[in-house]
Image: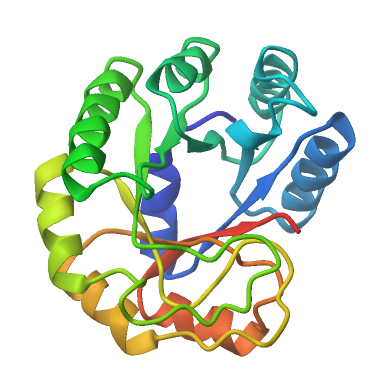
Amino acid sequence: MLINLQKILAVAEEKNYAIGAFNTPNLECIMAVLQAAERHNVPVIISHAQLHEEIMPLDIIGPVMVNMVQQSSVPACVHLDHGEDISYLRRALEMGFTSVMYDGSTLSYEANVENTQKTVELAQAYNAGVEAELGTIGEREGSGGESAAQMTDPETAKKFAESTKIDALACSFGTAHGFYTQEPKLDFERISKIRELTGLPLVMHGGSGVNVPDYEKSIECGVRKINYYS
């Protein structure tokens, strides 16, 4: 059952849990995630990241993702993860993706806002949701030990959310992409403040390797989508 990001996050809000979002760059991954979701009767998000284009082109895997979700018995969202080019996001939306993430985290704040606003306007035409990122989430093989200056500032997040009208915010609060070289130390006070000021469902990137108690505490603090790949 294909639904958009707004609807699946509304379920997470109602039930006070987080939706698992899994990158699925091949058929076996798609089947595994959807079969597990059906076995447990829970909603799920399957994702394709732009950086996977070299190993699995969007034009090949995207229609497969959409078709399999349409046939699934559980509510599921097809998401474009870490899209850096609006033209690439448009391609995903045109093939039926119901959620896109614009990643302008390496740009200036002003450029990130401008491009995120364009993405929101684009997605609305397809009844799709938008996630965006603010702050610096650690790269591959990260320690999860980003400095406070690299993490998402709550006041800036409030301004960003009001300016862009996004549906979900990916925040930097101590996680990192890829495998951890040491146990991450998550800033729960920071994420709680961001949630309080923005009112948005928050997204944990770098969910692979985070322990269960930290998952649970993050959910208590307002995380409603947890990304898992590595």
| Residue 7 image offset from top left, x and y in percent | 39, 42
Q: Is 75 located above or below residue 95 in the figure?
A: below
> Residue at left 59%, top 30%?
1
Snapshot colouring: rainbow
Question: Is the residue 149 above or below the residue 89 in the image?
Answer: below
Q: What count of labels does the image hold? A: 0
Query: Above or below — where is 180 with respect to 98?
Result: below
Counting from the top left corner in percent of width and height, residue 223 is at: 42, 68
- Which corner quadrant of the image does residue 139 belong to? bottom right
Residue toward you, 26 or 217: 26
Q: Position of residue 31 (x, y in %)?
A: 84, 37
Whole-percent x, y for residue 173 in the image: 41, 75
> Which quarter shows the C terminus?
bottom right
The image shows residue 28, relative to residue 191, as above or below, that is above
Query: What residue is shown at x 58% (from left), y 68% (from top)?
Result: 176
Residue 193 seen from this side? yes
Residue 49 visible, this angle: no
In screen coordinates, is 182 left or right of 185?
Answer: right
Identified at 22% across, 38% down, the residue is: 111
